Image (cartoon, rainbow, N blue to C red):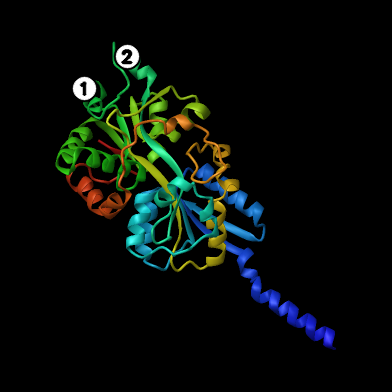
Amino acid sequence: MKRSILLFCLLALIAIVLPVSAQSGTLNVLCTPQEVWCEGMAAAFEAKYPEIDVEWLRMSSGEALAKVMSENGAPTYDIWWGGPMDSFVAASAADLLEVYDSPNYENILEDQKDLFISPKKDYVGIYVGSLSFNTNTEFLAEYDGLEAPKSYEDLLKPEFKGQIVMAHPSTSGTAYTFVSTVLQIMGEEAGWEYLKKFNDQVAMYTKSGAGGGKFVANNEFGMVIMFSHDAVKEIDDNGAPLVITFPEEGTGFEIGSQAILKGAKNLENAKLWFDWAISAEAQQLGPEYQAYQAPTVKGVELSHPELLEVKLIDYDFEWSGEHRQEFQDKFANEIQNAEADEEGLIKK
């Protein structure tokens, strides 16, 4: 009898210390990188935690932020994984992210902890990527002496008129990074004047940042502005005839981030993903899924270090995030509206 009581008490204690819900059930992931990476990460997490069923949805970062904002603390998803930090700054300011002091913050690169971990500890950087100009070499060959652009002014050359593709900043974090970069380099007044001239050069806007790559790779247009790791994917995996260049004035960059959404229905499982995503085990998986961003944790080699060996501006993520909605609205109202066709393209 005493042995039975002792066994019952021991089992009850284990149940308290190790709740079943922590490693079983469901996890809903709002994912913004490319679909193949989202799918691969979900599968890897399920392999690590076979009792957890991962449901995920891929959205562009602009769409993801809009969804998080509209759900206003009653989220459909538990964790938001990927997309430029500016979006997370905006969501944090609206108090829509869960504060979580992850034990795996110790994995973050020592000299970058202040940059990668939010002051409130409600989001953290999971990868880094630089913004680049990506030009079709066959297009360049059509013009005697035309070189791939190496400055923002080069984008305004007559040869590039109607040949540039970029995502729209209302839906894409990639494009918003470009807009914010221009404003930070040139100042707001001169920056907006430049963006109006730049808009005259653009053939069309896509919904997602990497979406324009295929049009330029297929020789439909001359150049695309997107993150350099997405250009590498087009070159290495699809044989695209692209040359990657960076503006001599300096280029912007993203710190792709993640956060647990406040009000998450599967909070413990979200914490498991959050911890795992800032481990070397998880971050070394990127290249397996054609994701060539730089890691944010110790113990992972850079697949393409040259993409960050360029002149980067001192990008102000807080300022960029605080003004995100204002600048998106200004771009849509004064430069180019965000009314897309059924394929998600804004053709001019």
Q: Is residue 140 visible?
A: yes
Furthest residue in direction bottom, as rendered: 1
Pinpoint residue 148: horizontal percent, then vertical percent.
32, 21
Type of residue at label 2?
Glu
Q: Locate the N terminus and report the quarter of the image it occupies.
A: bottom right
Q: CA distance from mark 1 to mark 2?
A: 14 Å
The image quarter containing residue 308 is: top left
Q: Residues within 10 Å of mark 1 (few under 14, many from 20)?
A: few
Instruction: Identify the residue position indicated by label 1 in the image.
Output: 158
- What kind of element bears circle 1? helix
Type of residue at label 1?
Pro
Up/down of 223 relative to 278, above or below: above
Instruction: Identify the residue position indicated by label 2 in the image.
Output: 142
Up/down of 142 relative to 298, above or below: above
- What kind of element bears circle 2? loop
Pinpoint residue 80: horizontal percent, then vertical percent.
46, 56
Q: Residues within 10 Å of mark 2 (few under 14, many from 20)?
A: few
Furthest residue in direction top, as rendered: 144
Q: Is residue 343 visible?
A: no
